[in-house]
Image: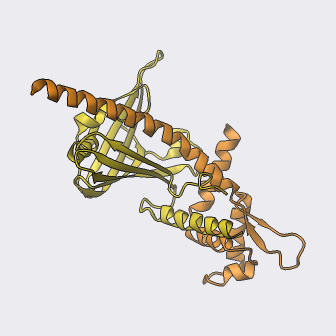
Chain colours: A orange, B yellow
């Protein structure tokens, strides 16, 4: 559990930055080199590389080893983990709305008796 | 990738209730109604204060009876959208009993855990019945509570889906 939590924290932390989200959005369209990723930003190459390392560390992108230009590719697995994490809220809400349903029925019954 | 692997928003629940739209609105916005249904199983709601207008604060306490004493959890937030019988939006963060926001890490949650979440309730009057669509989205620490993260995340997921479908 602990290591799952840590992974999730890494993903959330990696996503909590607009430049990194923009990089991911770009990579969702296909692989790109660091130079290509840097293009839309008024940011130095080392600064972009730093963001890429954070994303890589979180497992959101992988960087090719073979080709000289080492293209980056997106990996959506951590995003799926976020999705699973949110599922626990679904159960809580579903149960709450069941209670709301019952409560509304009670109110409706009371109203009918009073009439 | 199926639509289920990544939901566009965090949690989206659609329900139709056998009740008029104004009653469902009251379920969400009047404390005496809200306390009757809200919260995880086994919890009661001893406190629900809500100043239901844009910018107005909320403070909710959830309490669970346990053999080793009662556990209380407080959340606070701000109403972001208030259109009676149609649209309710509010943020939610962990808090202390005075309504001061407590960082998730101070509550023992790992670093990077969402600092705030946003609940959106959309109601549709079906003539005596009401369709409700509730969205509960997480916002990571450092992203601000403006929902920008969610929009960006939506776009990202849309992109990924579009690309996956084309393959």
Tell me: residue B161, above or below residue B112: below
Image check: A109 left or right of B166? left
Residue lying at the far right of the rendered structure:
A66
Q: Residue at image x 74%, y 77%?
A: A32
Q: Is residue B123 visible?
A: yes
Residue A29 sits in quarter: bottom right
Q: Nearer the viewer, residue B112 or A32?
A: A32
Residue B99 sits in quarter: top left
The quadrant the C terminus of chain B occupies is bottom right
Image check: B91 left or right of A43? left
Image check: B123 left or right of B7? left
Q: Residue at image x 67%, y 54%?
A: A78
Residue A18 on image: x %, y %: 55, 69
Residue lying at the far front of the rendered structure:
B127
Q: Nearer the viewer, residue B89 or B162?
A: B162
Q: Residue at image x 22%, y 30%?
A: A107
Residue B87 on image: x %, y %: 29, 56
Tell me: residue A48, above or below residue B79: below
Residue B130 on image: x %, y %: 29, 47
Q: Residue at image x 52%, y 55%?
A: B141
Residue lying at the far left of the rendered structure:
A115
Image check: B132 left or right of A68? left
Q: Is residue B39 visible?
A: no
Q: Nearer the viewer, residue B137 or A17?
A: B137
Residue lying at the far top of the rendered structure:
B67
Residue B77 on image: x %, y %: 35, 49
């Amino acid at each position: 559990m602990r290591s799952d939590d840590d992974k999730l924290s890494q993903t959330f932390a990696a996503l909590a930055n607009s430049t990194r989200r923009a990089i991911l959005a770009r990579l969702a369209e296909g692989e790109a080199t660091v130079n290509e990723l840097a293009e839309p930003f008024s940011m130095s190459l080392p600064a972009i590389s730093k963001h890429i390392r954070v994303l890589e560390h979180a497992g959101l992108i992988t960087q090719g080893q073979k080709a000289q230009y080492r293209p980056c590719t997106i990996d959506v697995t951590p995003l799926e983990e976020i999705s699973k994490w949110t599922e626990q809220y679904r159960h809580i809400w579903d149960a709450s709305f069941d209670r709301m349903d019952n409560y509304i029925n009670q109110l409706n019954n009371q109203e009918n008796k009073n009439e | 990738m199926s639509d289920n692997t990544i939901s566009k928003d965090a949690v989206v629940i659609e329900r139709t209730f056998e009740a008029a739209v104004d009653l469902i609105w009251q379920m969400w916005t009047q404390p005496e109604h809200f306390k009757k249904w809200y919260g995880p199983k086994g919890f009661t709601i001893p406190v629900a204060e809500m100043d239901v207008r844009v910018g107005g604060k909320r403070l909710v306490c959830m309490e669970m009876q346990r053999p080793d004493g009662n556990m209380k959890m407080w959340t606070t937030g701000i109403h972001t959208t208030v259109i009676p019988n149609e649209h309710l939006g509010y943020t939610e963060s962990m808090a202390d009993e005075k309504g001061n926001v407590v960082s998730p890490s101070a509550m023992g949650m790992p670093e990077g855990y969402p600092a705030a979440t946003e609940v959106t309730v959309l109601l549709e009057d079906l003539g005596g019945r009401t369709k409700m669509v509730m969205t509960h989205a997480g916002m990571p620490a450092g992203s601000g509570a403006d929902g920008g993260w969610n929009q960006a995340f939506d776009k990202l997921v849309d992109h990924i889906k579009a690309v996956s479908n084309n393959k």
